[in-house]
């Protein structure tokens, strides 16, 4: 599919009703995908998505669009592989061009420990359904000729894991594909509608208070990205989440020839090329938890320095744009999906720096939970109560930003 065969769609923006079966707070990818799958897979359409700004204004419109399933623990590999598969058929399912492109992803190692980690990643991935192999420095050079495998003589590339199915998709198109699909089936989306409180009765969530008045709901789903601790606190739920800013930037145009996605697990940066030819670069979260959307020169300097060590051609480019999102970082670097212990109140959170790739599977699975009241097997390991049960899903090394 391409932009010339896209259909024009006229959407009906409705006034809020006083009550819905399901209210989803947050018009990012996860909230909208949950609404879409509720309508498309379960025929539940008396649903509202409430977004305090415009849809996609949170992290879903700010990320570096990398889609992969090369995680380090079996539960995560299975979950993200499902998402990767849903992404590959999303254009056919929604009829919208989301610019999905399989590129292959190199995770380079520069130390003996890094080599062991990437070898073990390839093994775990292969065992649980993701296509990842260990490759030598010479193979790295063949896959991405721009890589200086001597690492400027400082950080030589000692090997890498290569995840052939690694891909990208245009983030705001993904948001709009789900939004349009949901609205066409009868879901209401209300922008400029901030949830300021939760209505509760006898320990059960019964609706939301918004800047435009109250809305009753049988079920409220929190999908508010980095603002989740505030919203959950309204229901008396304490989450093992901290919010950290994450920055990214793009350079001016470079000739279209950088086909793979390249990341360094020791130097903590990742690079891909956009359809416009910009080099898109990201790195680790800001250490200090905060809700700040400020972008700093220190980040640009430090990240560029590391990236140029392995990709020297970058030094000839100019940085043209930089931005920040605020990420819901969970204590074990895995998502938190499902029931909360408060009747009628569900969360999809802990998406940190890795939740764009999870939008299709996260939405599909949350919709199944809301529709059936039963936690699907695929997301059961990511339940909130794992922290109380001492069953954390520790996978820090797969965040890509640690
Ligand atoms: C710079 C950067 C790079 C990233 N790169 C990648 C990547 O390459 N691959 C990847 O998989 N992930 C990546 N991520 C992470 C990914 O973007 C997020 O995990 C994902 O988008 C989360 O989606 P979401 O729907 O949960 O949250 P969001 O998209 O943040 O949506 C939450 C929405 O809730 C709204 N909201 C908040 N509070 C309220 C309220 N009280 N009432 C109503 N609405 C409210 C917000 O306005 C927002 O629109 C990156 C993130 C950043 C910041």
Image (cartoon, grey):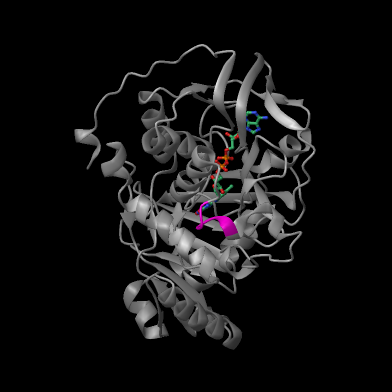
Q: Position of residue 109 (x, y in %)?
A: 53, 79
Number of marks in the rendered image: 0
Position of 2 relative to 398 (above/below): above
Magenta stretch prevailing secondary structure: loop
Query: In the figure, is residue 207 to the left or right of 189?
Result: right
Question: In which quadrant is the N terminus drawn?
Answer: top left
Front residue of 300/273: it is 273
Q: Position of residue 318 (x, y in %)?
A: 49, 52
Q: Position of residue 70 (x, y in %)?
A: 47, 68
Residue at x 80% of width, y 38% of height: 236
Q: Position of residue 154 (x, y in %)?
A: 58, 82
Front residue of 159/202: it is 202
Position of 27 relative to 76 (above/below): above
Residue at x 32% of width, y 77% of height: 142
Residue 27 lies in quadrant: top right
Query: In the figure, is residue 240 to the left or right of 300?
Result: right
Position of 399 relative to 336 (above/below): below
Camera sees residue 350: yes
Query: In the figure, is residue 50 to the left or right of 211?
Result: left
Question: In which quadrant is the C terminus drawn?
Answer: bottom right
Front residue of 203/298: it is 203
Q: Quadrant of ligand 1?
A: top right
Q: Does the magenta-highlighted stretch encompass residue 166?
A: no
Q: Residue furthest left?
A: 5
Q: Which residues are magenta?
A: 376-380
Residue at x 63% of width, y 20% of height: 216
Residue 162 lies in quadrant: bottom left
Q: Residue furthest bottom?
A: 112
Front residue of 306/167: it is 167
Residue at x 74% of width, y 42% of height: 229
Camera sees residue 294: no
């Amino acid at each position: 599919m391409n932009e010339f065969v896209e259909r024009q769609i006229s959407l009906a923006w409705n006034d809020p009703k006083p009550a819905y079966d399901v209210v989803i707070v947050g018009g990012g990818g996860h909230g909208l995908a949950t609404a879409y799958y509720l309508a498309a897979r379960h025929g539940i359409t008396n649903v509202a998505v409430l977004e305090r700004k415009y849809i996609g204004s949170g992290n879903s419109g700010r990320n570096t669009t990398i889609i992969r399933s090369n995680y380090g623990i079996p539960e995560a590999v299975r979950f993200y592989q499902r998402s990767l598969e849903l992404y590959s058929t999303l254009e056919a399912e929604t009829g919208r061009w989301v610019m999905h492109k399989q590129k292959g992803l190199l995770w380079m190692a520069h130390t003996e420990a890094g080599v062991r980690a990437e070898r073990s990643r390839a093994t775990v991935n292969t065992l649980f359904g993701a296509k990842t192999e260990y490759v030598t420095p010479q193979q790295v050079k063949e896959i991405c000729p721009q890589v200086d495998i001597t690492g400027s003589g400082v950080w030589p590339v000692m090997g890498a894991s290569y995840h052939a199915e690694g891909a990208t998709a245009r983030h705001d198109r993904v948001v709009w594909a789900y939004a349009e699909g949901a609205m066409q089936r009868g879901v209401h989306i209300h922008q400029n509608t901030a949830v300021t409180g939760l209505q509760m009765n006898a320990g059960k969530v019964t609706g939301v208070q918004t800047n435009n008045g109250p809305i009753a709901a049988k079920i409220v789903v929190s999908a508010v990205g980095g603002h989740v601790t505030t919203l959950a606190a309204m229901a008396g739920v304490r989450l093992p989440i901290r919010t950290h800013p994450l920055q990214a930037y793009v350079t001016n145009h470079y000739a279209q020839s950088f086909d793979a996605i390249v990341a360094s697990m020791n130097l903590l940066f990742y690079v891909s090329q956009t359809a416009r030819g910009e080099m898109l670069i990201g790195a680790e979260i800001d250490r200090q938890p905060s809700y700040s959307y400020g972008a700093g020169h220190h980040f640009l300097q430090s990240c560029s320095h590391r990236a140029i060590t392995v990709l020297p051609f970058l030094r000839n480019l100019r940085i043209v744009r930089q931005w920040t999102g605020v990420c819901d970082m969970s204590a074990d670097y895995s998502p938190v999906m499902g029931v909360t212990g408060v009747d009628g109140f569900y969360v999809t959170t802990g998406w940190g720096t890795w939740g764009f790739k999870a939008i299709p599977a996260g939405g599909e699975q949350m919709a199944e939970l809301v529709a059936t009241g039963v936690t699907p097997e695929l997301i059961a390991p990511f339940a909130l109560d794992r922290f109380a049960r001492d069953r954390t899903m520790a996978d820090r090394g797969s965040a890509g930003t640690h």
